[in-house]
């Protein structure tokens, strides 16, 4: 396979649901939370794992999550409140005193860095597709609701961090992933014209936001294909290099 820099497509990949399997990630998080926090704050790893399971079910309840997003004036405020609620909530369930705010935020940050690099939840097709695109010279960035630090940990664990440029990450633009402005700002930050951007996501609403920002979109949908929305719907990332091949000039695609 020849490496070509003639690409006129810049790819922005979501993580959970596109590169990583959230269903496999969650139980690994629970175990790693226990592994990390028990020696530092007390309690047993099993109790911490259960506290994480219970608390995240509450935090990620769709209505509660949407209310949290709407209440945050920007990403920095959202992340500060979330980290404190995450660690403090688990401590509350365990009957363990929560650390003071500054210490708690730093401890949550260190725990997340520890956990993300140890999670192994990539979809089978993800890593080969990412490497195929990278070796063909297709610029790759992320477009995720996760922070750039979390994304760096996950991609390091997958062994593909070097394949990516910028890891967006609402923290890099201080904008939550909850509307077209998220994409407008990451395209501007990356210096990419919206017409040259190809956004890959598993959420039809996020796909619609990317389209509203002027990008082309691929929706990853392992079930029945949707009738409306993005121009392309694929079951896994295995099909993404073929789509990009059709978008590029003859001889410039991943398969050349």
Image (cartoon, helix red, strand yellow):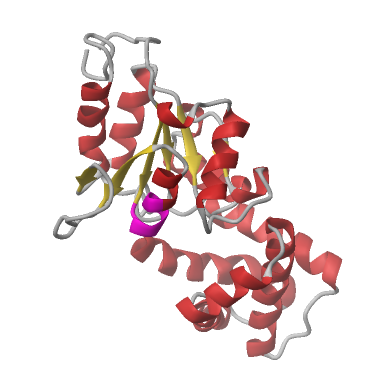
* Image x and y of residue 11, in percent: 41, 32
Q: Quadrant of residue 13?
A: top left
Main SS of residues in magenta: helix
Q: Write down the region rendered in magenta.
A: 202-208
**Residue 117 visible in the picture:** no
**Residue 225 visible in the picture:** yes
Q: Residue at x 60, y 68 (%)?
A: 69
- Between 131 and 58, the residue placed more toward the observer is 58
Relative height, residue 136 to residue 46 (above, below): above
Residue 184 vs residue 204: left or right? right
Instruction: Work out which residue is located at the far left of the displayed protein and give it.
Output: 224
* Image x and y of residue 247, in percent: 26, 23
- Between 35 and 175, the residue placed more toward the observer is 175
Image quadrant holding the N terminus, namely top left
Count of residue discs: 0
Residue 109 vs residue 69: left or right? right
Q: Residue at x 52, y 55 (%)?
A: 179
* Image x and y of residue 185, in percent: 60, 40
Q: Residue at x 35, y 55 (%)?
A: 17
- The verdict on residue 29 being magenta is no
* Image x and y of residue 47, in percent: 56, 83
């Amino acid at each position: 396979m020849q490496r070509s820099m003639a690409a006129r497509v810049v790819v922005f990949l979501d993580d959970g649901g596109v590169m990583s399997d959230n269903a496999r990630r969650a139980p690994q998080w629970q175990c790693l939370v226990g592994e990390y926090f028990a020696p530092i704050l007390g309690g047993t790893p099993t109790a911490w794992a259960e506290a994480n399971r219970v608390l995240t079910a509450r935090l990620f309840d769709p209505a509660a999550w949407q209310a949290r997003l709407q209440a945050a004036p920007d990403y920095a405020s959202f992340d500060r409140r979330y980290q404190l609620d995450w660690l403090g909530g688990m401590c509350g369930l365990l009957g363990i005193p929560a650390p003071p705010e500054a210490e708690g935020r730093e401890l949550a940050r260190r725990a997340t860095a520890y956990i993300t690099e140890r999670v192994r939840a990539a979809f089978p097709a993800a890593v080969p597709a990412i490497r195929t695109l990278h070796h063909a010279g297709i610029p790759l960035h992320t477009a995720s609701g996760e922070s750039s630090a979390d994304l760096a940990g996950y991609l390091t664990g997958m062994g593909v961090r070097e394949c990516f440029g910028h890891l967006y990450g609402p923290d890099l633009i201080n904008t939550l992933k909850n509307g077209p402005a998220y994409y407008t700002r990451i395209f501007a930050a990356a210096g990419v014209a919206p017409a040259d951007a190809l956004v890959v996501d598993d959420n039809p609403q996020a796909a619609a936001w990317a389209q509203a920002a002027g990008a082309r979109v691929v929706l990853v949908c392992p079930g029945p294909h949707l009738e409306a929305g993005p121009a392309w719907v694929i079951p896994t990332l295995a099909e993404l290099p073929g789509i990009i091949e059709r978008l590029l000039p003859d001889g410039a695609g991943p398969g050349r």
